[in-house]
Amino acid sequence: MTNPAHAITAAADRCLALAETWLAWDGRPVVTDGANIWTPAKAARRISDHLIDHLAEVEALLAGEPPLASPWHGRTVTLDSDWARFTELDIHEARARWPRLAQSYVHRYAMAPDAWDTPRDPNWTLRAIAEHVSGITWYAEQVGEIRFGDSAGIR
């Protein structure tokens, strides 16, 4: 039986691969879907927030408690801090944070294999949460791969 949280570690690795190119960001945002503004810092923030938010949800569900409602605004807002340069320290922080958070899912799920598919209405099953969280690559893909000399733009 394959631990569904392994998809999260693969997603974190993919996010890191893209983020390692963001040092070349020229300060211009990427605009997707006509209205969503993306910068490397915003994508990094959303990846971390998503990993943290759903890990807290998993812990609550396994404890038999309702998860706390998420007060975050998600991708609908761009914070002032999202416009900051993406530096070597930012990628260092991502390398330190994202794999650890992803590994926390793997370890937690390994402790409760019989609970992966337990219905948790109105919440998702743990397997469905892992599948959802593995979608963090979407945030990184909004910024995409940046090479020196590339410019951001509309996607």
Image: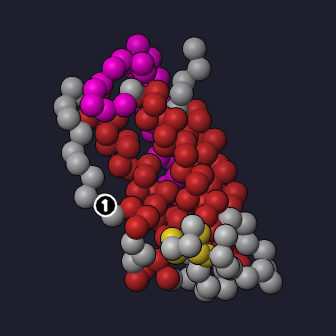
Which residue is depicted at the point 50% across and 46% down? 100
Residue 82 falls left or right of residue 52 = right
Q: Is residue 89 visible?
A: no
Q: What stretch is highlighted in magenta?
A: 95-124
Circle 1 residues within 10 Å: few <14, some 14–19, many ≥20: few
Q: Which amino acid does label 1 sit on?
A: Trp
Which residue is depicted at the point 28% across and 26% down? 121
Tell me residue 147's x, y (percent): 78, 74
Residue 124 falls left or right of residue 28 = left
User: Which quadrant does the N terminus fall into?
Assistant: top right
Mark 1 lies on residue:
72
Q: Which of 9 and 121 lies nearest the eye of the viewer?
A: 121
Q: Which of 28 and 3 lies nearest the eye of the viewer?
A: 28
The answer to whether residue 119 is magenta is yes
Tell me residue 131's x, y (percent): 52, 35
Vertical comparison of 55 with 4: above or below:
below
Tell me residue 77's x, y (percent): 39, 72
Tell me residue 95's x, y (percent): 58, 57
